[in-house]
Image (spheres, rainbow, N blue to C red):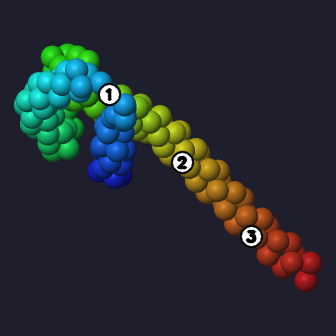
């Protein structure tokens, strides 16, 4: 379940990462944009590798330490946003597990109580059967 959720999240985030470009840019704006793209292309390679390592650690050991570091160190970057999303989803997942465990404990207690009540009722049924047999024997 965790892997499916993680895969879906990454697929969604990958699809959202494409930025729309204006069709009517002035030459100077195009040059500035190309320079910005070149600068951004260098940093994401390092950030992407760090993010991949953090993701591998999360999947293998279920720890978010590297994701938290990425979120703090690369604040404002796409990878920090991805890390933040994964951290948020992991926290929600853990909260859901705690709620489910609480419900499961309560259901186990209810089951034990119902089983005791069932045993008590079965004992009463046996007593009633015995009384019925005795009554039929006395009537004859």
Residue 139 higher or lower than 38, as above or below: below
- What mark, if any, has residue 25 been given in the picture? 1
Q: Pointer 1: residues within 10 angstroms few (<14), some, or many (20+)?
A: few
> Which mark is in front, 2 or 1?
1
In the image shown, does 133 or 16 lie closer to the viewer? 16
Residue where numbered disc 3 is placed = 130
Task: State which tag comes first along the sequence, 2 or 1.
Answer: 1
Q: Residue furthest right?
A: 139
> How far apart are the alpha carbons under marks 3 and 1?
96 Å
* Element on which disc 3 rests: helix
Residue 136: % across, % down: 86, 78
> Which mark is in front, 2 or 3?
2
Q: Is residue 42 left or right of residue 138?
A: left
Label 3 near label 2: C-beta < 8 Å? no
The answer, for residue 7, to whether it is visible in the render is yes
Q: Quadrant of residue 140?
A: bottom right
Residue 24 higher or lower than 72, as above or below: below
Residue 109 higher or lower than 22, as above or below: below
**Which residue is at 67% across, 62% downward?**
122
Residue where numbered disc 2 is placed = 112
Q: Is residue 45 left or right of residue 9?
A: left
* Element on which disc 1 rests: loop
Residue 54: % across, % down: 14, 34
> How far apart are the alpha carbons under marks 2 and 1?
72 Å
**Which residue is at 30% across, 43% downward?**
14
> How far apart are the alpha carbons under marks 2 and 3?
27 Å
Task: State which tag comes first along the sequence, 2 or 3.
Answer: 2
Q: Pointer 3: residues within 10 angstroms few (<14), some, or many (20+)?
A: few
Residue 30: % across, % down: 23, 27
């Amino acid at each position: 379940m965790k892997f499916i959720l993680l895969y879906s999240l990454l697929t969604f985030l990958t699809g959202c990462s494409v930025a729309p470009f204006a069709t009517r840019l002035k030459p100077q704006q195009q040059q500035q944009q190309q320079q910005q793209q070149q600068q951004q292309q260098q940093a994401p390679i390092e950030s992407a590798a760090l993010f991949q390592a953090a993701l591998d650690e999360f999947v293998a050991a279920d720890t978010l330490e590297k994701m938290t570091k990425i979120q703090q160190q690369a604040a404002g970057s796409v990878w920090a946003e991805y890390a933040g999303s994964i951290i948020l989803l992991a926290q929600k997942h853990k909260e859901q597990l705690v709620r489910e465990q609480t419900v499961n404990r309560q259901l186990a207690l209810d089951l034990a109580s119902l089983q005791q009540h069932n045993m008590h009722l079965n004992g009463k049924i046996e007593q009633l059967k015995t009384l019925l047999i005795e009554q039929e024997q006395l009537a004859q």
